[in-house]
Image (cartoon, rainbow, N blue to C red):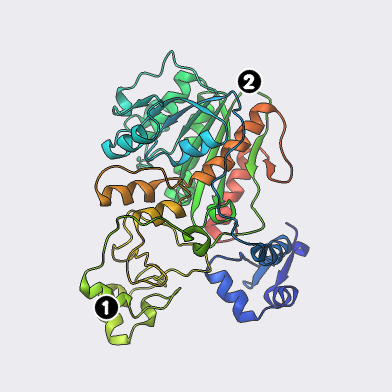
């Protein structure tokens, strides 16, 4: 955007007819985004102002929560790696894809996949034991665990990353030769080793015959009632002349109230009495700062004297906002996800609703294992929107209203990484 595409916080306040404090509160909660000017004051994109205005009006039209599913298959196949409880796999199925193989080593997650999709070809071996040669698929997808690998003294070619899960992801791509590969990871991968880890991964994918683009997607703008960011990496085989297509953000958000309306009852964790007493003092949307100072120091311990807002600690969620990013345990200290009204952690089914799993998707294993599977998943609706874009790439046509073409080139990727480092990237 040019400078003229941005307005100051005062101008944004006037355009939206809300107070400056409201703008600041929205920004803090991630409901509106800003960047810093050269003189270090906040600027708000005009397009973002339009989005907020439209979102405020569209929220009046009623609950938009739904799990999206295309009406027909797209005739394309996918191999899904590190499948977990099936968030991305189900999203891609809902977008029309057929799965030829899913690989998941965790026994509870594999049991969840088998329980819900007995017709899927599920391989629960260690991925290092799987021979992909001879297999075929249009797409390979994988949310590979991001193990740190040392950069010192290494060229980090394909053979240099053996032993990492990224190597197994790249090996599958090399052996299968799909038209498109989709990688998924946390946003923090942009900054790991000052961006060199991601740059090395891009180099490796290019080495095996693919060109690459990536983008951070914020789930709260893709029909997911949750503030969750995922780095999506797209790789296109070099012999194919097709563009990179990513989903456009929606002009509305979903709230926790939308997600949990008529949510089925289910099992869930409970707070110990001491924590329950602490959490009972927190109002919806509040956190540990609402406690009396003596209790703040007692509950926070050494963390009380450290920097940072630590706003996720002793946090009670708000009905009228998207949920905070779900973690692997809603009762764990420093990542509490307390129900807005009742003094208890969110239940398993509430967790699943927020991740846009359907109510009939049954999670296997202990309660803790179920929370872990859901907390680690890619939201199903986010997977659906990514799947629609990959379908558009393969079909050679796309919907300009809901999708956008992202230019290929390492310069673009380097700019996005640098902007993120400086706090400028959206």
Between 17 and 404, the residue placed more toward the observer is 17
User: In the picture, residue 411 is in which quadrant?
Assistant: top right
Few, some or many residues within 10 Å of mark 1 (<14, 14–19, 20+)? few
Q: Residue at x 28, y 83 (%)?
A: 295
Mark 1 to mark 2 CA distance (whole Å):
62 Å
Percent coordinates x, y for residue 241 in the rendering: 68, 25
- Establish if 375 lies above or below 151: below
Few, some or many residues within 10 Å of mark 2 (<14, 14–19, 20+)? few
User: In the picture, residue 395 is in which quadrant?
Assistant: top right
- Screen quadrant of the C terminus: bottom right
Q: Residue at x 55, y 65 (%)?
A: 30
Residue 226 visible to the viewer: no
Judging by the rendered image, the residue that carries numbered circle 2 is 239
- Establish if 378 lies above or below 327: above
- Screen quadrant of the N terminus: bottom right
Secondary structure of the residue carrying numbered label 2: loop
Percent coordinates x, y for residue 103 in the rendering: 37, 29
Secondary structure of the residue carrying numbered label 1: helix
- Establish if 368 lies above or below 409: below
Between 308 and 216, the residue placed more toward the observer is 216
Percent coordinates x, y for residue 234 in the rendering: 56, 36
Which circle marks residue 277 in the picture? 1
Between tags 1 and 2, which lies in front? 1
Q: Residue at x 38, y 48 (%)?
A: 374
Asked if residue 417 lies left or right of residue 317, the reply is right
Residue at the outermost right position: 4
Percent coordinates x, y for residue 383 in the rendering: 52, 41
């Amino acid at each position: 955007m040019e400078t003229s595409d941005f307005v100051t916080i005062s101008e944004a306040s006037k355009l939206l007819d809300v107070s400056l404090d409201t703008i600041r509160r929205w920004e803090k909660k991630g409901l509106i985004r800003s960047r810093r000017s050269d003189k270090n004051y906040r600027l708000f994109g005009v397009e973002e102002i339009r989005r907020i205005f439209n979102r405020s009006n569209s929220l009046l039209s009623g609950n938009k929560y739904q799990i999206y599913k295309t009406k027909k298959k797209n005739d394309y196949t996918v191999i899904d790696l590190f499948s977990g409880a099936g968030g991305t796999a189900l999203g891609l199925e809902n977008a029309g894809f057929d799965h030829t193989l899913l690989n998941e080593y965790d026994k509870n997650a594999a049991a969840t996949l088998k329980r819900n999709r007995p017709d899927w070809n599920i391989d629960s071996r260690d991925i290092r034991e799987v021979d992909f040669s001879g297999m075929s698929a249009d797409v390979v997808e994988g949310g590979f665990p991001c193990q740190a690998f040392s950069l010192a003294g290494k060229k980090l070619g394909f053979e240099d990353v053996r032993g990492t899960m990224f190597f197994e992801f790249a090996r599958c791509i090399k052996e299968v030769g799909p038209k498109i590969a989709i990688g998924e990871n946390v946003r923090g991968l942009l900054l790991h080793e000052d961006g060199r880890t991601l740059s090395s991964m891009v180099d490796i994918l290019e080495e095996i015959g693919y060109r690459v683009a990536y983008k951070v997607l914020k789930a709260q703008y893709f029909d997911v009632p949750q503030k969750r960011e995922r780095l999506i990496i797209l790789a296109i085989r070099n012999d194919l002349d097709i563009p990179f297509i990513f989903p456009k953000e929606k002009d509305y958000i979903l709230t926790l109230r939308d997600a949990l309306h008529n949510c089925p009852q289910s099992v869930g964790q409970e707070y110990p009495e001491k924590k329950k007493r602490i959490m009972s003092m927190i109002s919806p949307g509040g956190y540990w700062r609402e406690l009396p100072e003596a209790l703040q120091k007692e509950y926070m311990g050494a963390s009380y004297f450290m920097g940072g807002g630590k706003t996720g600690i002793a946090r009670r969620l708000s009905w009228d906002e998207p949920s905070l990013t779900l973690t692997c345990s809603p009762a764990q200290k420093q990542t509490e996800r307390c129900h807005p009204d009742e003094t208890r952690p969110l239940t398993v089914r509430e967790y699943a609703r927020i991740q846009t799993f359907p109510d009939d998707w049954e999670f296997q294993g202990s309660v803790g294992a179920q929370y872990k599977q859901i907390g680690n998943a890619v939201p199903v609706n986010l997977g659906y929107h990514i799947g629609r874009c990959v379908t558009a790439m393969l079909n050679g046509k796309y919907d300009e209203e809901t999708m956008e073409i992202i230019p290929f080139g390492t310069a673009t990727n380097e700019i996005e990484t640098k902007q993120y480092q400086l706090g400028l990237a959206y």
